[in-house]
Image (cartoon, helix red, strand yellow):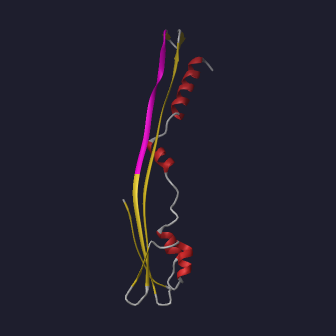
Amino acid sequence: MNIKNLSILALTGTLLTACMSAGEHKQAVSSGPSTFTLGKVQSTVRQGMPQDQVVASLGSPNIVTNDEFGNETWVYDKIASESAYSTSSGGGGIGGLGGGLIGSALLGGIGQVGGNQSAGAVETTQKTLTVMIKFDPQRRVNTINYHQSKF
């Protein structure tokens, strides 16, 4: 392999591995799933389930109220703010002192071939999930209502 091909190969390898795209950064900062999700509520809480099993599945509620008949309503109110930032910069080049003959061009003095690139991503998300579970007089799940938003 001659010096021209070696130089091009080194420059190309440096530039390709030195930086990530904004999309790759976004994917790199994504977090795992939350432990309290609507899917978890829908798959684990069933009508007729006793209160102790609801607590075992979802944990303690944020709010407990009683209606005029003494029946309890449990409210799970979850709010999440997620913010992620990722950045990189990179560049590469070939520089040197002196001179040489590459192809048909004569290079001399101090020179550098290459470039710098930078990319980054910022993402902020707000999520809310409110779950209301109403119990009957025997303290078993009667109804389940929920509201979920993401912005």
What kind of secondary structure does the magenta stretch mostly adopt?
strand
Quadrant assignment for the C terminus: bottom left
Q: Residue at x 55, y 73 (%)?
A: 57
Q: Residue at x 49, y 74 (%)?
A: 42
Instruction: Report whether 39 appears left or right of 130.
Output: right
* 1 over 82 or under it: above or below: above
- Check residue 148 for magenta coloring: no
Q: Nearer the viewer, residue 29 or 114?
A: 29
Per the rendered image, the range of residues in magenta is 109-123
Q: Nearer the viewer, residue 52 or 6?
A: 52
Query: What x and y, as percent, mark residue 126?
Result: 39, 58
Q: How many marks?
A: 0
Q: Residue at x 49, y 52 (%)?
A: 30
Q: Nearer the viewer, residue 146 or 66?
A: 66
* 124 over 1 or under it: above or below: below
Quadrant assignment for the N terminus: top right
Q: Nearer the viewer, residue 4 or 76?
A: 76
Query: What x and y, as percent, mark residue 36?
Result: 50, 67
* 98 over 12 or under it: above or below: above
Hey, which quadrant is residue 115 in on the image? Answer: top left
Hey, which quadrant is residue 55 in on the image? Answer: bottom right
Q: Residue at x 46, y 88 (%)?
A: 136
Query: What x and y, as percent, mark residue 138?
Result: 50, 90
* 46 over 115 or under it: above or below: below
